Amino acid sequence: VVSSLEWPFVSKYRASVCTQSPRLEMIDSLFKPQGKDDNGLIRDGVSEGQFNQVLDKELAKIIEKNHHTRFFVPKGDDAFNVAPGTVVDSGICHPVNYDFYMCAHAGRIGTTRPTHYHVLHDEIGFSPDDLQELVHSLSYVYVLSTEYQRSTSAISLVAPVYYAHLAAAQVRQFVRFDNMSSDTASSASGGAAPVPELPRLHKNVRSSMFFC
């Protein structure tokens, strides 16, 4: 779980990482360390069939990267990528649910793949334009630290989701897989596979963007 610090400055983030049982995608232990209200939750890694579970356990805006939708601008006999910042929120979207497609980045090589956003719950009361502008702006804050920017242009989806993937990949290197074969055999025979433990981060590292 990645969260922004020092709101409304949204270029500095911290991560909270924990392990869960295999094939468990719901976040059961979501919490607010500072005790403040959430300004918004953006969730990745769940399918449309799991939206009700997310509403029961997590209130979130769902990001869907793995889809086959593409947008083009026809010019004569050719077709070109749409301009960065293009939003499609009608015509091909869900007839009932609140969703939209956004191409925040420029497709330099190949075809631009839009990100599909599903809004499951909105307590703030964003207008569609305001919410889409916020999502677009969060595509420009992908930084290595407060002094050095990792990307000078927009990325394909909002920076917090990228940071969450980076944090998971970084912490995964600390997981011990010495007993992987025995754990796999235990799971295959019907026993529950043990959840690996993670080492505690040093206090000087916890609030830093160590995952970058």
Image (cartoon, rainbow, N blue to C red):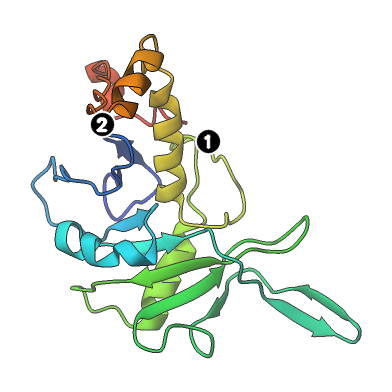
**Considering depth in this image, is 60 or 38 the residue closer to the camera?**
60
**In this figure, which residue is indicated by the disc labeled 2?**
18
Query: Going 27% across and 62% down the picture, which residue do you hit?
Result: 60
| Image location (x, y in percent) of residue 49 | 34, 66
Compared to 63, does 173 lie above or below?
Answer: above
At label 1, counting other C-alpha atoms closer than 10 Å, the crowd grade (few under 14, some 14-19, many 20 or more) is few
Q: Quadrant of the N terminus?
A: top left
| Residue at left offset 29%, top offset 78% | 126
Q: Amino acid at mark 2?
A: Cys
**Up-down: is 192 above or below 73?**
above
The residue furthest left is 35
For the view shown, which residue lies furthest in the top direction? 178
Q: Is residue 191 left or right of residue 74?
A: left
**Residue 74 got which mark?**
none
Q: Nearer the viewer, residue 42 or 95?
A: 95
Where in the figure is residue 193, as x and y percent of width and height? 26, 26
Q: Are dots 1 and 2 in contact, CB under 8 Å?
A: no
Q: Is residue 137 left or right of residue 103?
A: left
- Answer with the quarter of the image where residue 177 lies: top left
Residue drawn where x is 77% and y is 59% of the image = 110
Rendered residue at 24%/60% (across/down): 54
Q: Secondary structure at mark 2?
A: loop
In the image, 135 versus 53, the foreground residue is: 53
Residue 71: % across, % down: 67, 75
What amino acid type is highlighted by mark number 1?
Answer: Tyr
In the picture, residue 94 is in which quadrant?
bottom left
Q: CA distance from mark 1 to mark 2?
A: 28 Å
Q: Residues within 10 Å of mark 2 (few under 14, many from 20)?
A: some
Seen from the viewer's position, the closer of residues 185 and 208 is: 185
Q: Which residue is mark 1?
A: 148
